[in-house]
Image (tube, grey):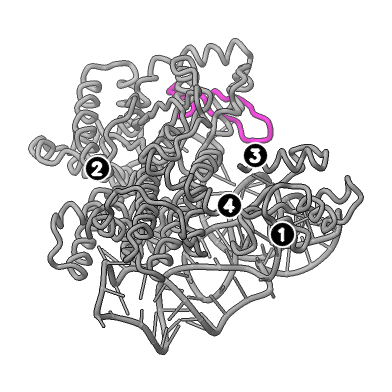
RNA sequence: GUCUCCGUAGCUCAGCUGGAUAGAGCAUACGCCUUCUAAGCGUACGGUCGAGUGUUCGAAUCACUCCGGGGACACCA
């Protein structure tokens, strides 16, 4: 429809299609679409009002002219028929589109560190990445999800040394991650007093790189127990599996060819004993330490080239915190300098930090906040609130899990991802206002209405589509383009905001008239509208990886 | 110091590929359940869009400068 209006106007005015802008009026009573006519003035040498009036006279749409805008009104009955019948027919498939059809997209996200607790620091990457995964699939992309586990690096040298020195096997068997965390924290405390420990750690990492048997044995064990532990958190978040769990270690033997390639293209320089690549406008990238050991960026380049070969992606998303933006700039420049042409399809999907009382949630010195603990706490709090509202509820454990976890996810996704967010469990779980529970409540309310639906054919004769209903229907009609906008911006918050608006439209409609009407035909129409809303809320929350609840 | 992100109502934030009187939620005050879940709906209160200059028919939105805050910046990832 949008495209048809644009081409109609472009051909009528004989201007380029790109010059025609179509937007939604600020005030919904102005119209359904608005075409500002100011930009045509220059080219056509007429006033915007004249042009708008000319369009009104010559286009076959119901419209009016205000302040240089042409406001277009849709045929309410026809649009309503089409929207409701489409949604009820397509259900979970409503909003599926071909924006990314035939394209491969690789998304790297979550990426917790082996041998460390799955901390809050990885929450944002996990939920944003999973949402982008769902959204991309909805847009027709062939998605490959990668959990780039932090299973390699100097910290493993430190950890092996620390475990050998202070570790306790019984404790390790009982609660592996706690014991590993304990010795790791111990290492940092001791290293502050005795810096030579850092050298020991580096030495053990070097052994690991050289496939030393003892080092490898510890490393494998640490990884194994960690992955088992992580899955408990993923289960809570409804994340089944990733297409790949190849972590940094996978690229252990794939870095030398990259270094050779850099060498052969004369990009390497030695500076202060380290091997670097000089870049344009930004600081040089350190490829090898002065002791010859590899660094993060070297692996990332190896991984990127490897993934390009294996997945032949059209686009690759790295869902990693804002603080790494320089790193990804370096990676892209190096790829360019190596002569590859896909660096513009490498996208760093940055996000702000989670703050606790205005401060960063830290992982150093054992102060990390464990994600699973927070989710469990959220579930408990949700349970308490739900029982206050509805003491006789069925399936309290399942409901509080869905609300508690959903609230945490929604809180993370509702704002533009670049911004920092203050994490406050009380606010996150508020059952009023712009929250996950508000959406789940709206869904449950509709669900209870739907028991009155008879699933009979109804007609649109004598059906009054007033302002509240029309706003709701028009919102439903915008779902698909909202998904595409979310993908274009790689920003799940666009969906979250849409759902809040949709729920507000529904609740307004619900508050102002009775749905189960004495007139059976009218009731059936309204219940069909309600069902359509429920389908879209479920569908949209699904994209955010949040479950709905039938009763709460 | 350099680069970068951010600065909108008391608080948390939308709006930012320029467009019509700057919008929500929370908080505060009041109102709406003998009928579908009041976890809802409504009314009121609340803004020099950090400051300034410029570009434009038009700037919260773009450019530049300044102020304030966060982050990154060589052997961590």
For the record, the magenta segment spans A275-298
**Residue A536's disc number:** none
Residue under the point 38% across and 59% down? A522
**Residue A75's disc number:** 4
SS under mark 4:
loop
The image shows residue A344, relative to residue A526, as above or below, that is above
Which x, y percent locates residue A250?
35, 20
**Residue A233's disc number:** 2
Which x, y percent locates residue B31?
39, 87
Give yes or no for contact between labels 1 and 2 (Cβ–Cβ under 8 Å): no
**Residue A64's disc number:** 1
Q: CA distance from mark 4 to mark 3?
A: 17 Å
Front in this rendered view, residue B18 or A477 = A477
**In the current view of this chain or complex, which residue is farthest to the right?**
A45
Chain assignment, label 3? A
Chain assignment, label 2? A
In reply to whether residue A508 is colored magenta, the answer given is no
Give the mark, 2 or 3, whose residue is nearer the N terminus: 3
**Residue holding disc 3:** A3
Which x, y percent locates residue A527?
34, 56
Are labels 1 and 4 on one chain?
Answer: yes
């Amino acid at each position: 429809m949008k495209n048809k209006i644009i081409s109609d106007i472009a051909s009528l005015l004989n201007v380029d299609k790109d010059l025609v802008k179509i937007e939604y009026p600020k005030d919904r009573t102005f119209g359904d679409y608005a075409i500002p006519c100011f930009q045509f003035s220059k080219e056509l040498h007429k006033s915007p009002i004249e042009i708008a009036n000319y369009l009104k006279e010559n286009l076959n749409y119901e419209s009016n002219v205000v302040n240089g805008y042409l406001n277009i009104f849709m045929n309410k009955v026809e649009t309503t028929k089409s929207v409701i019948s489409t949604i009820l027919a397509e259900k979970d498939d409503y909003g599926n589109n071909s924006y990314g059809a035939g394209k491969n997209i690789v998304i790297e996200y979550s990426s917790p560190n082996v041998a460390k607790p799955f901390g809050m620091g990885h929450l944002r990457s996990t939920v944003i990445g999973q949402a982008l995964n769902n959204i991309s699939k909805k847009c027709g992309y062939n998605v490959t999800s990668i959990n780039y586990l932090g299973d390699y690096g100097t910290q493993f040298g430190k950890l092996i040394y620390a475990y050998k020195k202070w570790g306790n096997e019984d404790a390790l068997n009982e609660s592996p991650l706690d014991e590993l965390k304990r010795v790791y924290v111990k290492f940092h405390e001791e290293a502050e007093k005795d810096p030579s420990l850092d050298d020991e750690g580096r030495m053990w990492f070097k052994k690991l790189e050289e496939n030393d048997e003892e080092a490898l044995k510890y490393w494998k064990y640490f990884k194994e127990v960690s992955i088992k532990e992580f899955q408990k958190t993923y289960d809570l978040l409804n994340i089944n599996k990733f297409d790949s769990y190849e972590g940094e270690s996978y690229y252990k033997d794939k870095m030398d060819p990259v270094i050779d390639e850099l060498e052969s293209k004369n990009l390497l320089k030695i500076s202060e004993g380290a091997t670097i690549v000089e870049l344009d406008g930004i600081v040089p990238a350190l490829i090898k330490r002065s002791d010859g050991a590899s660094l993060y960026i070297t692996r990332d380049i190896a991984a990127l080239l490897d993934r390009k070969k294996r997945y032949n992606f059209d686009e690759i998303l790295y869902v990693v915190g804002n603080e790494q933006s320089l790193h990804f700039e370096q990676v892209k420049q190096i790829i360019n300098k190596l002569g590859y042409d896909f660096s513009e399809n490498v996208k760093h999907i940055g996000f702000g930090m989670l703050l606790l009382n205005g401060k960063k949630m830290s992982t150093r010195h054992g102060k990390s906040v464990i994600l699973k603990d927070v989710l469990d706490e959220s579930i408990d709090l949700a349970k308490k609130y739900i029982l206050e509202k509805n003491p006789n509820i069925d399936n309290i454990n399942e409901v509080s899990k869905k609300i508690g976890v959903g609230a945490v996810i929604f809180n993370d996704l509702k704002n533009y991802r670049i911004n920092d967010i203050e994490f406050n469990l009380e606010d996150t779980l508020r059952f009023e206002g712009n929250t996950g529970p508000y959406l789940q409540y709206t869904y449950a309310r509709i669900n209870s209405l739907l028991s009155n639906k008879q699933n009979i054919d109804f007609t649109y004769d004598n059906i009054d589509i007033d302002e509240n209903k029309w706003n709701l229907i028009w919102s439903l009609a915008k779902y698909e383009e909202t998904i595409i906008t979310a993908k274009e911006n790689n920003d799940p918050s666009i969906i979250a905001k849409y759902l809040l608006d949709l729920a507000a439209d529904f609740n307004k409609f619900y508050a102002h008239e009775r749905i189960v009407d004495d007139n059976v035909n009218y009731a059936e129409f309204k219940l069909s509208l309600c069902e359509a809303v429920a389908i879209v809320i479920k569908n949209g929350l699904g994209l955010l990886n949040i479950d709905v609840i039938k009763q709460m």
